Image (cartoon, coloured by chain):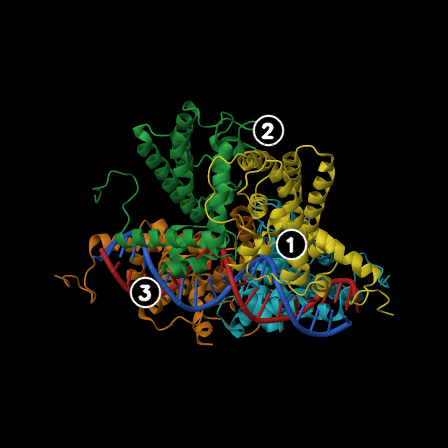
Chain colours: A yellow, B green, C cyan, D orange, E blue, F red
Amino acid sequence: MAGTGTGTAPRMRADATRNRERIVAAAREAFVLHGADAPLDEIARRAGVGNATLYRHFPDRDALVRDVALAVMDRVADRARAALDESEGGDDPFEALRRFVLGAVEERIGALCSMLSDRFDRDEPRLLAARQRLEGLLEELFDRARRAGRLRPDAAVGDLLMALGQLTRPLPGTGCAQVERFLVRHLQIFLDGLRAPARSELPGQAVTLETLLTD
Amino acid sequence: MAGTGTGTAPRMRADATRNRERIVAAAREAFVLHGADAPLDEIARRAGVGNATLYRHFPDRDALVRDVALAVMDRVADRARAALDESEGGDDPFEALRRFVLGAVEERIGALCSMLSDRFDRDEPRLLAARQRLEGLLEELFDRARRAGRLRPDAAVGDLLMALGQLTRPLPGTGCAQVERFLVRHLQIFLDGLRAPARSELPGQAVTLETLLTD
Amino acid sequence: MAGTGTGTAPRMRADATRNRERIVAAAREAFVLHGADAPLDEIARRAGVGNATLYRHFPDRDALVRDVALAVMDRVADRARAALDESEGGDDPFEALRRFVLGAVEERIGALCSMLSDRFDRDEPRLLAARQRLEGLLEELFDRARRAGRLRPDAAVGDLLMALGQLTRPLPGTGCAQVERFLVRHLQIFLDGLRAPARSELPGQAVTLETLLTD
Amino acid sequence: MAGTGTGTAPRMRADATRNRERIVAAAREAFVLHGADAPLDEIARRAGVGNATLYRHFPDRDALVRDVALAVMDRVADRARAALDESEGGDDPFEALRRFVLGAVEERIGALCSMLSDRFDRDEPRLLAARQRLEGLLEELFDRARRAGRLRPDAAVGDLLMALGQLTRPLPGTGCAQVERFLVRHLQIFLDGLRAPARSELPGQAVTLETLLTD
DNA sequence: GATGAATGAGAGTTCATTCAT
DNA sequence: TATGAATGAACTCTCATTCAT
């Protein structure tokens, strides 16, 4: 009955898959709105499943956060992919970067900040893969902009990722409208700071997710 | 009858004052490390007092957060004051701004982000006074840099305050060293984005703490 | 899908129902012995369940008190019903009233005094229904005795209910035996005062639960 | 310096006496309003003294309750004394009893119910004396009414004292107006039940405070 | 003697996680 | 497998009581 699939895991029942997806979606919303400490029971309720079902799919909170982070990373990577595709035509590669950055804000990537915490095994295969995909795409975006002489040479993708993460973290108890306005302005200034030519010398060595996690 | 003091509040006993200060210091540390939800009992333990002592001084969590925020704002304002004083000599006013920004990071101003949450009465006199002092000093820093033609004209102090707040928020479970490095790099880039001439047009109108809180 | 039940609420699991009943029983005992402030943890312990189980069934103390009060009112109403049934045979209706009163003491109706407190929503459907049932039965008892000329005409059921409530309130820290003896004597005297013909004029207008709660 | 008084205790300083009285008065109010569990700190605050001052005068809660009870008993005894005096003229002795009962309600004698609890040493000299004085006066009131053939012979002063105590206990969270109305009606009915000739036979033997406390 | 401050022992409540149906 | 129920640990806050000034 199981195992007709090609992968290693026994294939999930259709409703199980649907439940899992609903849980991840609800969790993402909850994490964005109430931070990474959002009650799991509430997430289950929002997903329309019993709490024990959540625990069947995700043995503990970290497992859930990890999957949410994976989902977010995937969506952000998709946006990077799209930005690359749209800029194939040869227009300003920095503009592609800018579009990506301002769009990525909507993914509330800050929700995955907890992922950077040391409790996560950074060699966990799926995380590793997702990170590498995302970083690869961003490197490409950066490279193009750098080669076009539009990006300061001492900036690294880690700078951008950390910025997106820290800046999009939910501010508990605050309505979104004003924060949104601040966010866009901040990123615009930040992007201006990223342009070539560099107006100062960046201290330290380039920050990569790798070094961040290895600390 | 007692009354050598000039104020209206009955003077505090020496040990009470000391305890209060120790509590605020412990709370500041805890908020920086574990966020504004850090257990109060733990804070009391770290301060070396019983938990009820904490509650005597601060009837609820908000009162404690408020006092920590006030302390942080004061220290940040002191740094702004120092930056102004040091730049009297006529050297580059943007440099004064830069020194202030990179120094202010050490105050972990992010701990007061919760202060922006709507549960706080933004007209509470002490908060109001502290904010006005801080904003006044920053306005002066900004004005000097603007007049010297070193600061993009469309930036506002609110942009800077929000940036400092959001960027220095504690990242739960993460050691500081790497984050520190990222932080400095980010702010350096951000500062470069703030320089004149502006490399783009900032969207929306200037963000002030006032508008943020009035939303 | 499940649904052999006719009601609207999803049917409870067998063990949950048992636990709930045990909690209510333990609460009733505790309220009788130690008043409405009896520690909930202790009640849970006596019921043989974890404290959180109590909170699952009753979100706060009021909810528990309410259910205990409902149970007590139901049992008291059952006694009124029985008194009515037994007196069908045409014997002295005041005697039926007396039997009811002295029997009702055993239900420790005083435990529900808190129910009269203003924190309860007097229009809550179940409370309303229970009260109306009880009052209806008592009215019938009163009517029969009045029609037989055995009850003073100016007495109202509210007088009796308040008397039962106030007199059976738990006396913290006191063993029951002596209080029991006093109680029976007091009610006997009170009943004698209720007999026709009235020996004085009652001041004020008749007290009903309704007026008590509407105040 | 001490011992100019006639008693055994060293005489108190004038302000100490005043403080003590203010504490007892505040405690009486608090017990009436919020029951015998009223926070001692609050009582001290209302009395306008520090909490430690309260503890200097009353080593624990029981000591305070005892003194409040003594004060209440004294005032009730004063009312009994007055009722006796006013009825010297030969008018209806039951009427004197009635006046006493309805007046005594105002002393909220229920506040001393806890005094009956077994934790109190019933041989404590002051309590004993106060009780004996009160009971003596009530016996006299009862005797006169009995001799005039207006009081049922099987009623005892204990019945009345318990009634006053139980009926005037504070009902937490309830406004007074309605309860007051009920109270007066109840006592009127109870008094009617006390009149001669007895309309029934009282069960058990007469309840005296003595037997209650000896249980 | 009087006071404000300090304290520890609970009480109420929430929540991640495990259990039984 | 999915679910509602159960649980104990943790946290916030209160209060009687003791301590230091």
Q: State how far apart marks 3 and 1 are (Cα).
A: 68 Å
In the picture shown, does residue A210 fall above or below B186?
below
Rendered residue at 86%/64% (across/down): C4
SS of the residue at dot 1? helix
At which x and y percent is residue A101?
63, 39
Mark 3, residues whose alpha carbon is within 10 Å: few (<14), some, or many (≥20)? few
The amino acid marked with disc number 3 is Pro
Same chain letter for marks 2 and 3? no
**Which residue is at the front of the view, A214 or D154?**
A214
Which quarter of the rendered picture does the N terminus of chain B lie within? top left
Q: State how far apart marks 2 and 3 are (Cα).
A: 70 Å
At which x and y percent is residue C91?
75, 66
* Mark 2, residue position: B203
Rendered residue at 28%/61% (across/down): D56
* Mark 1, residue position: A131
Label 3: chain letter? D
Which quarter of the rendered picture does the C terminus of chain B lie within? top right
Residue furthest left in the image:
D1
Q: Is residue D101 visible?
A: no
The amino acid marked with disc number 2 is Pro
Q: Is residue C190 visible?
A: yes
The residue mark sitting in front, 2 or 3, is 2
The residue mark sitting in front, 3 or 1, is 1
C56 left or right of C169? right
Same chain letter for marks 1 and 2? no
The amino acid marked with disc number 1 is Arg
SS of the residue at dot 2? loop
B79 left or right of C137? left
B53 left or right of C75? left
**Which disc is residue D59 wearing?**
3
Q: Is mark 2 in CB contact (under 8 Å) with mark 3?
A: no
Quarter of image, res D81: bottom left
